[in-house]
Amino acid sequence: MISCDSKKENKAPTQDALENIFARKSVRKYLPEPVEKEKLEMLLKAGMAAPSGKDVRPWEFVVVDDRAVLDSLAAELPYAKMLKGAPLAIVVCGDKSRSSYWYIDCSAATQNILLAAEALGLGAVWTATYPYPERMEAVRKYVDLPDHIGSLCVIPVGYPAMPHNPKNKWDETKVHYNKW
Amino acid sequence: MISCDSKKENKAPTQDALENIFARKSVRKYLPEPVEKEKLEMLLKAGMAAPSGKDVRPWEFVVVDDRAVLDSLAAELPYAKMLKGAPLAIVVCGDKSRSSYWYIDCSAATQNILLAAEALGLGAVWTATYPYPERMEAVRKYVDLPDHIGSLCVIPVGYPAMPHNPKNKWDETKVHYNKW
């Protein structure tokens, strides 16, 4: 166990791991309350605990809590209007010079962040920027990304404004045995 | 809570959700014991609990426990030699006709499967087939994928042959605030 062991750090335990996977849902409305620094750090640690091809870890994270930047991103990203009401966002980026499939590794990191948010009582949602050039350019402009850095998504984060039920997406017809 | 609630189904609880994220590691050596049907189903349910762009859920899963197929894949996939000693594998696939970025949604599903495996005491590892044409063709051949289905990865699954420690990959230099 590394430093994120909730018992060792005397932190409140989170829910059962499997239940947490099934409880995760996309949350698009948030309370105005800020997200605690400790929780933000846990989200970032969770992101970096993802696997990556050849263990290259091409991910980079831009934490955005500047109201002007959040609002500018909300204005330019068609499916991220909820940034206008979010106290925080994490932009998940990847270093294209270090991995040609950075967006795959960053997807695993993003899923870890979404699950950690659920575990911490936070709400979050994956708003895609990759593979859309105009969205990626908007992010590049507002958070000053250098040319070798691409953005996979923007994750607004906050305390959910209302309770949500997760979807049950189980579909047996999607399982095949040994041969398609 | 949906049907995977461990309490309602009277199943053993798994570990704390955050601890599980940090405890996940790549496991490449397995005991010969088979994976129980209930645990396999839980892995597949976890995969399908992932988010997907526009909720399209382009994923499809091929469960492989046929020794001949596992061995053929081991022979042709350069980074999946451990399939030779694995009792089971899940091939995570996506329907290209339903989503042009199926590999992103399937990456989130794959991460959920890896985390569920950790929660269930199983060992697993992401062996990439996408974006490598020759690896994707090998998978297509041995599990008979139709043309519109692509494979993202093959996940060998089994009980770990030895204990493993997770890596601590936390790196503060990868966190940026508001601007790069």
Image (cartoon, coloured by chain):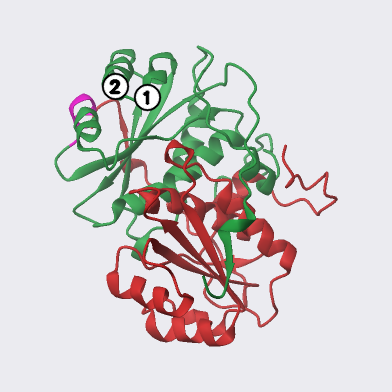
Chain colours: A green, B red
Can residue B87 be seen at all in this image of the molecule?
Answer: yes
What numbered label is drawn on residue B143? none
Residue at label 1?
A80
* CA distance separating discs 2 and 1: 8 Å
Nearest to the observer: residue A35 or residue B126? B126
Q: Is residue A108 left or right of residue B65?
A: left
> Residue B129, how many percent across, how many down?
37, 68
Please tell me in which quadrant of the rendered image residue B139 appears. bottom left
For mark 2, does the 10 Å Cα neighbourhood hold few (<14), some (14 to 19), or many (20 or more) residues? many
| Above or below, B166 relative to A68 | below
Residue A95 place in picture, x, y as percent: 24, 48
Q: State yes or no: residue B16 in magenta.
A: no
Dividing the picture into quadrants, the one containing residue A173 is bottom right
Looking at the picture, tell me which residue is in the foreground, A159 or A180: A180
The answer to whether residue A8 of the structure is visible from this angle is: no
Of A131 and B15, nearer the camera is A131
Residue shown at 64% from the left, 43% from the top: A22
Instruction: Residue at the far left: name it.
Output: A147
Identify residue type, mark 1: Ala
Q: Secondary structure at mark 2?
A: helix
Q: Main secondary structure of the magenta part?
A: helix
In front of the other: B135 or B10: B135
In the depicted structure, whether residue B71 falls above or below residue A3: below
2 or 1: tag closer to the N-terminus:
2
Give, as a single range, the part of the protein colored magenta.
A140-145
Mark 1, Cα crowd under 10 Å, few <14 / some 14-19 / many 20+, is: many
Residue indicated by mark 2: A73
Do tag 2 and tag 1 residues touch (Cβ < 8 Å)?
yes
> Closer to the observer: label 2 or label 1?
1
